[in-house]
Amino acid sequence: MTPTVPDSKTLTIRPSPELLPAHEHNALEAGRDYSWNRGNYSPSIRAARIWTFVLTLSRRLWMDGKAWSYRGGMTEENLAKRRRSRAIWIRETFLDLGPTFIKLGQLFSTRADLFPTEYVEELSKLQDRVPAFPFADAQTIIEADLGKPLGPLFKSIDPVPLAAASLGQVHKAILHSGEEVVVKVQRNGLKRLFDIDLKILKNIARYFQRHPRWGKGRDWIGIYGECSRILWEEIDYLNEGRNADAFRRNFRDQDWVAVPRVYWRYSSPRVLTLEYMPGIKISHYEALEAAGLDRKLLARLGAEAYLRQILNYGLFHADPHPGNLAVRTDGSLIFYDFGMMGQIQSDMRSKLLGIFFGVAQKDGNQVMKAMIEVGALEPIGDMGPVRRSIQYMLDNFMDQPFENQSVDSISDDLYEIAYGQPFRFPATFTFVMRAFSTLEGVGKGLDPEFNFMEVAKPFALDIMSQTSPNSPGLFDQIGRQAAQVGSTAFGLPTRIEETLEKLEQGDVRVRVRSIESDRLMRRLGSIQMGTSYAILFGSLTVSGTILFVYDKLPLAVMLFFGAAVIALAFVRLLLRLNRNERI
């Protein structure tokens, strides 16, 4: 049906035979009907659904720590299987709960320092592909935000969206000047949904913060604030337009990078009009070969473009999945979707130098101190285990040639060490690691021999040698280290005096922990409990036998049943003792 507008102009439907932008391939089928897609957002109903999910999750997590809830015992295999099924259920529930939770799940998929590996892997599969909303809703939003009917704005617009996501959908259009554009329209009522959900999530964050088990060592209120900020920024299309302009300016001297131009006259906080820039999706390898493009060169250019964003410009694309990266027929790379961007301030980059130098020197102590300065590590009373974990990774990391290392394996090792330790990776850090892993996967798809670390080597060496004109030189580095040593030396007497004062006041406690002693104490406790079980079993059996002899059958049966329960508990205790002995 051809939509009409009040000034009697008719908008024609004109599907383009050309290649669509890679991130907009194929309009979605109606498919599954989600309740949140209807636009009727009731705060009470949303609260009931969300809190039902949270309380159900809490109950299931509580059961995960109970041995009796596992068929076949609480083995490592059963634990991993339970975590995997739990992660799949969380991913499906997030999709049912709508845009807020889809985006939240995508953010959580970068936080391997907070969640088990199975959760991170499943949440990373969370697809932001949902049914489209009616074109009439899109038309209403465009006309309300731009202040004109569609006719004076566009020569034609396709009512069938090129693609639909949880936050909005994209329509192809032609301006009266003849320029082809894409119009990104936000879902109706999305801000209201975010407002309702984020208020509920704030209370949930407080609930987890106060929880005796899940709140320990976790800043859930801070995590909520960070996620809330990112979500609000992503639904501000004017902010996305500014990001796209800044990204284009950074790459203005590289003709092998292309960014769609923003049409500001046709844009608002809920509508973003961009240059129509078709390309071949970077993961469509057969189409790339058919177009005569060099796949090895494309893999290297993709990695180099991202390294420039991180190390040279400090502004980087935080979601560089294959749908947001395409290739033009001339071999240049096209970047799409600038709603989620990361920024590294100049002072942060200087702090990261400390980590680079510590890694190069295999100095776990220096890396630990630098990570505390960056905010990736929370200082605790005993930092010895943390330092040893970092040193262990450095020893294994540096034993391999630089070119043979994999971003994926490095990040997996890092997150495995970080989980359960006081590491608090900032969103910027996790975005960078996820992007590096994604680009490495794309690169290997383009070129099986591709190695991201090999491309990164010149950039890393440039930082290590500090050859950048904006970076301090060797003498500056020596001067800074000398000043640090001098500051430490001058502060030493005060620190000694404070320590002596604490000793005099009895404020210093020395804690000695012996693993063998702990194990022996646990064994003695178990033996004592076993003795109690044996005595109780014997007493119940003798009493039951006496009652049975005197024809008190009901009481005798009850005592025999109690004895059987005690015997079962005794056998389980013996099995646990035997298992602990083998560890």
Image (cartoon, rainbow, N blue to C red):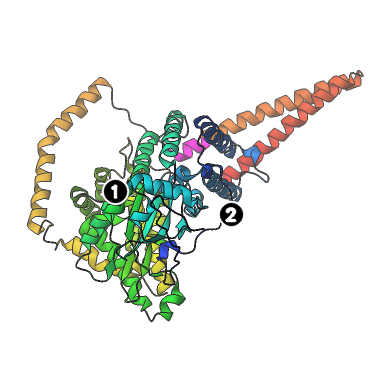
Q: Position of residue 139 (x, y in %)?
A: 42, 50
Q: Position of residue 420 (x, y in %)?
A: 43, 43
Which mark is first along the chain, 1 or 2? 2
Q: Which residue is mark 1?
A: 239
Can residue 112 be seen?
Answer: no
Q: Position of residue 234 (x, y in %)?
A: 36, 47
Would residue 309 be found to the left or right of residue 133 on screen? left
The magenta segment: 508-520
Q: Position of residue 270 (x, y in %)?
A: 36, 47
Query: Compared to 166, does 507 lie above or below?
Result: above
Total marks placed:
2
Packing grade of label 1 (10 A; few <14, some 14-19, many >=20) is some
Q: Residue at x 11, y 40 (%)?
A: 487
Would residue 205 be found to the left or right of residue 506 on screen? right
Packing grade of label 2 (10 A; few <14, some 14-19, many >=20) is few
**554 part of magenta stretch:** no
**Residue extending farthest front:** 8
Determine which of the numbered discs, if any, sits on residue 268 in the image.
Answer: none
Q: Which residue is mark 2?
A: 31
Can residue 103 be seen?
Answer: yes
Q: Amino acid at mark 1?
A: Asn
Front in this rendered view, residue 341 or 518: 341
Residue 282 picture quarter: bottom left
Q: Amino acid at mark 2?
A: Gly
Whole-Å distance between the Cαs marked 2 and 1? 31 Å
SS of the residue at dot 2? Answer: loop
Front in this rendered view, residue 352 or 529: 352
